[in-house]
Amino acid sequence: MLGSYAIVGSHLPMAVGAAWSARLRGTDQLAVAFFGDGATNIGAFHESLNLAAVWKLPVLFVCENNQYMEYTPIADVTAVARPAADRAPAHGIPGEVVDGNDVEAVEEAVARLARRARAGDGPAVLEAETYRHFGHSRSDPAAYRPAEEVERWLKHDPLDLARGRLAELGTGAETVAEADERARALVERAVEAAKAGPPPDPREALTDVWADGGAAWRT
């Protein structure tokens, strides 16, 4: 797992590199890159799709389209309706759109595209349509979003949809409540463990920045 980066879209070429590494090592690993709709207007997005397609690498590009590039609606700065999926065919890659708030739909699409990539059929783009319930950051009140738009998406909350689906399948409310409590307790334990742990060692800031046995100029 590779972490997040300050430069929008900078991790996409890294995902391509990870997929290339899996290919060279002969594993069945799949690289999955998550990014927002705004990253589709970054050059690295197109460069990564192109190279992944040329080499038919096992990588899945997952765009979390939450409709806004920080404060700007993606529709205001992008000519196509689906910023990731509509652009994928230009690079010879299949692009699909899924309801990002539908857990089952996302699972089905990811599983299918993962099997495709592992079978040697190359990369794919999956655009998950979703929404930010809050602002882009703690300092963002999100006042630029129409109230009716926010209300519409709040009614399409993924947890509510999942609960409704469980009810349709005959799962009792008590069972769902127990699952909620287990999940909440798991998160709380993780938070407490993180708080109780020692602070990071500053000397680790450069750990894994360079590969061992790298370029000859490293002495």
Image (tube, rainbow, N blue to C red):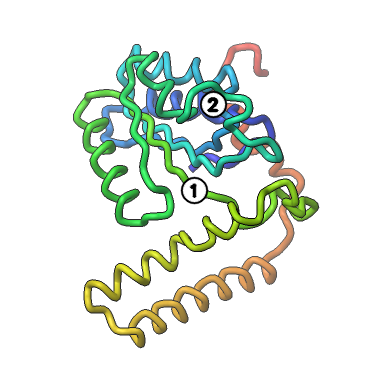
Secondary element at image label 2:
helix
Question: Observer-nearest residue: 74 or 216?
Answer: 74
Q: Check the image and report above or below for 57 versus 208.
A: above
Mark 2 or mark 1: whose residue is earlier in sequence: 2
Count all numbered tags in the image, as a single digit: 2
Q: Check the image and report above or below for 53 versus 198.
A: above
Where's residue 197, x and y in %?
Answer: 67, 66
Identified at 39% across, 78% down, the residue is 179
Q: Check the image and report above or below for 205 versus 140.
A: above
Q: Check the image and report above or below for 132 versus 97.
A: below
Question: Observer-nearest residue: 134 or 49?
Answer: 134
Residue at which label 2 appears: 40
- Which of the labelled discs sits on residue 163, or is there none? none
Is disc 1 surrounded by few (<14), some (14 to 19) or many (20+) residues within 10 Å? many
Q: Quadrant of residue 62?
A: top left
Identified at 55% across, 37% down, the residue is 36
Q: Amino acid at mark 2?
A: Thr
Identified at 42% across, 14% down, the residue is 50
Where's residue 195, x and y in %?
Answer: 69, 69
Contact between labelled residues 1 and 2, with CB atoms less than 8 Å apart? no
Question: Observer-nearest residue: 15 or 196?
Answer: 15
Where's residue 153, x and y in %?
Answer: 52, 56
What is the CA distance from the residue labelled 2 to the residue labelled 1? 16 Å
Can residue 37 be seen by looking at this rendering? yes
Q: Amino acid at mark 1?
A: Thr
| In the image, farthest residue toward the right | 139
| In the image, farthest residue toward the front | 148
Residue at which label 1 appears: 130
Give the foreground label among 2 and 1: 1
**Where, quadrant-wise, is the C terminus in this rendering?**
top right
Side of 18 where 148 appears, left or right: right
